[in-house]
Amino acid sequence: MTHRFPITVYYEDTDMGGVVYHANFLRFIERARSDYVRALGVDQNAMRDTGIVWVVTRIEADYLSPARFEDELTVETNVEKSTSARLTMAQVVRRDGRELFRAVVTAVCMDMHSGKPVRLPAELRASL
């Protein structure tokens, strides 16, 4: 299942040349992952209240073409692999169907107090 998340490039996202600053692509895909997890029925505030949070452990990213001020982008997110404690997602940022940025992101759930990985929430595992 591909999750699609729209992004509008604002002035604050760009450098002096009106091009999206490279680190902001990471912000864009973070928003899309949060929206995807929410769409799957996972309440991240409730998770945090129980002491469990998401932690990104790896990102492999390719910058293919620039995005610019006022571009309308779409972030596509797909789960590549899931285990009981790890989720690996492929994410692509597109403008008018053209691929601008792609990344493979690995995240785990972590116990805030012990700093150790824990199982993914049951509702997330069931929906995957």
Image (tube, helix red, strand yellow):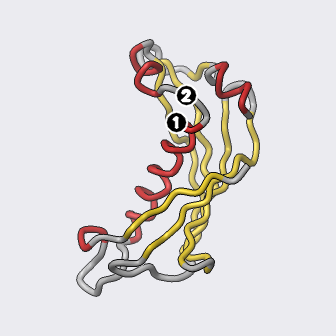
The total number of labels drawn is 2
Label 1, residues with CA under 10 Å away: few <14, some 14-19, many ≥20: few
Percent x, y of residue 87? 66, 38
Residue under the point 29% across and 70% down: 10
Left or right of 53 on screen, residue 11: left
Amino acid on which disc 1 is placed: Arg
Residue matched to label 1: 38
* Image vertical order of residue 55 relative to residue 106, above or below: above
Q: Nearer the viewer, residue 68 or 54?
A: 68
Percent x, y of residue 4? 59, 57
Residue matched to label 2: 42
Left or right of 119 on screen, residue 28: left
Left or right of 61 on screen, residue 111: left
Residue under the point 40% across and 24% down: 45
* Image vertical order of residue 21 relative to residue 34, above or below: below
**To which quarter of the image does residue 104 belong?**
bottom right
- Mark 2–mark 1 CB contact (< 8 Å): yes
Quarter that holds the C terminus: top right
Residue under the point 36% across and 71% down: 9
Percent x, y of residue 54? 50, 32
Q: Nearer the viewer, residue 50 or 70?
A: 70
Instruction: Assign a secondary structure to mark 1.
Output: helix
**To which quarter of the image does residue 118 belong?**
top right
* Image vertical order of residue 32 relative to residue 13, above or below: above
